Image (cartoon, rainbow, N blue to C red):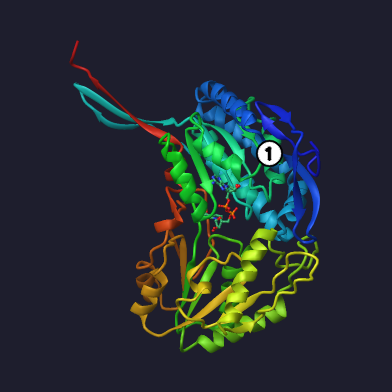
Amino acid sequence: MKVDGDFVMSINGEAVTTEHTQPVYNPATRSVFARVPDASREQLDQTVGAARVAFKTWSATSAEERQAALESYADLIAAHAEDLVALLTREQGKPRAGSEWEVFGSVDWLRAVASQRLPDEVIEDTDDRRVVTRFTPVGVVGAIVPWNFPILLAIWKIAPALMSGCTVILKPSPYTPLCDLKLAELAQQAFPPGVVNALSGGDDLGIWMTTHPDINKIAFTGSTETGRHVMKSASETIKRITLELGGNDPAIVLPDVDAKALAPQLFWAAFQNNAQFCNATKRLYIHEDVYDEVRDALVDFIAQEVVVGDGAEADTHLGPIQNSMQYGKVQAYFADCHVNGYTFAVGGDIDETAAGWFVPVSLVDNPPEDSRIVREEPFGPILPLLRWSDEADVIARANDTIYGLGASVWGKDQAALQRIGSQLEAGTVWLNEVHQYSPFQAFGGHKQSGLGCENSLHGLMEYTNWQTITMNKSAA
Ligand code: NAD
């Protein structure tokens, strides 16, 4: 299979194109380098029909058969890893190290999820009665993914959906469809026709999927705003939904830290994937005793260690903003900081004449708590640093948001880490580390950061219906 061209949709095991196509840009150059099909509503209907037919036989396979198929899929991705890494960097903009982490992480994820099982739960088994709860696959799953981690977040849905016995229709973001179309094309070698399908298209395709009467579940990752639309659309047919949405993660730095030693970790907590990361630290609360030291250590680290550029270049640490829409949003946050007279400790000025959608790494020095840069999710490399002095007050400030995805606390006093961490309203709280994920660890958002979870047996369960079967043994 050619990875760097011939981009097609996968419908019922067939490679499908369309007359009308959509452009795909390299964000490091702002130039179109590929085109992808633009699915019609009729093609969606056809795909849903094929996925429904395939569900009948796929859902009847044993867990061991499904495990073997998932493992062969992992082998195929591993065999094409080098090409996928290059393609991911080209369409998403992220540097090679980030692309490698995503591609090889996806291979590991597939293998781990393949080993997971949801055994029947025997609730009662006496001479008179037997009561068993089992987990049956929900049916056809629509998997809708964003543009920041197109491969990994697709696999987070494909793996548990297939393992639980469901069939899948993958819809990539229109900004990053290429790797996802190739993932689906590869899947045709590992699964029967109709089990894994992929359609490319615009946001309309997402709306058609979320309202389609024959799709049973939507597994969605994207913004909170779109998540609200998905929830509303899904209500028409009471679809199952998993929503992984936006975040505004706080990080709290205690007064006992070694500023210089901690600076690299705090930097990557906020700027990994060029801060286009749901779980990026988006508010950095630093105790007043070490505020100046930590700020200055971050500024030094950025000046000495961080290279922003084309992800395809070997020495690049951070790539461009992924697309023009997001670039415009990030520009607006910079403009808002300038209009309101906030001080930048570093960065602050975007060179709009640059070849790609590049934005300098920027730190905003203690802006007001009610500023847009603190309240909202910029999803770009601009981070507010905020002073704190009172523990109860900083916890209240950290929790004062509609979001509740992740949070972290940093310091030497382990009792304080535990005490503060346990009061934070977030799906994942990291203490002296950040961005540690696992296929065996539940991941999801509190409040408006999401509904349900991904990963672990809890995540697998989200692709199933509970069915309780009771039998009265003494009757008849
Ligand atoms: P987005 O919401 O704009 O788009 C996500 C997907 O939804 C895309 O495939 C898009 O085409 C589709 N879509 C758009 N409108 C739709 C509609 N009305 N109905 C159905 N589908 C529709 O998000 P994005 O800009 O691609 O991604 C960035 C956002 O995703 C950020 O808010 C980020 O925090 C969030 N995110 C969350 C997680 C998580 O796990 N919680 C992970 C990554 C990103």
Judge: label 1 CB < 8 Å from ligand 1: no
Q: Dot 1 corresponds to which residue?
A: 75
Amino acid type assigned to the residue bearing label 1 in the image: Asp
Q: Position of residue 143 (x, y in %)?
A: 56, 41
Residue 312 image position (x, y, % from top left): 79, 60
Q: Position of residue 44 (x, y in %)?
A: 61, 31
| Residue placed most toward the observer, 195 or 210 | 210
The image shows residue 368, relative to residue 148, as above or below, that is below
Tell me: residue 111, above or below residue 401.
above
Residue 333 visible? The answer is yes
Does residue 431 show up? no
Q: Is residue 352 left or right of residue 385?
A: right
Q: Quadrant of residue 40?
A: top right
- Give SS at disc 1: helix
Quadrant showing the N terminus: top right
For image coordinates 55% across by 88% down, the residue present is 293
Screen quadrant of the C terminus: top left
Q: Position of residue 269 (x, y in %)?
A: 57, 69
Residue lying at 62% horizontally and 47% vertically, measured from the top left: 106
Drawn side of residue 448 relative to residue 18, left or right: left
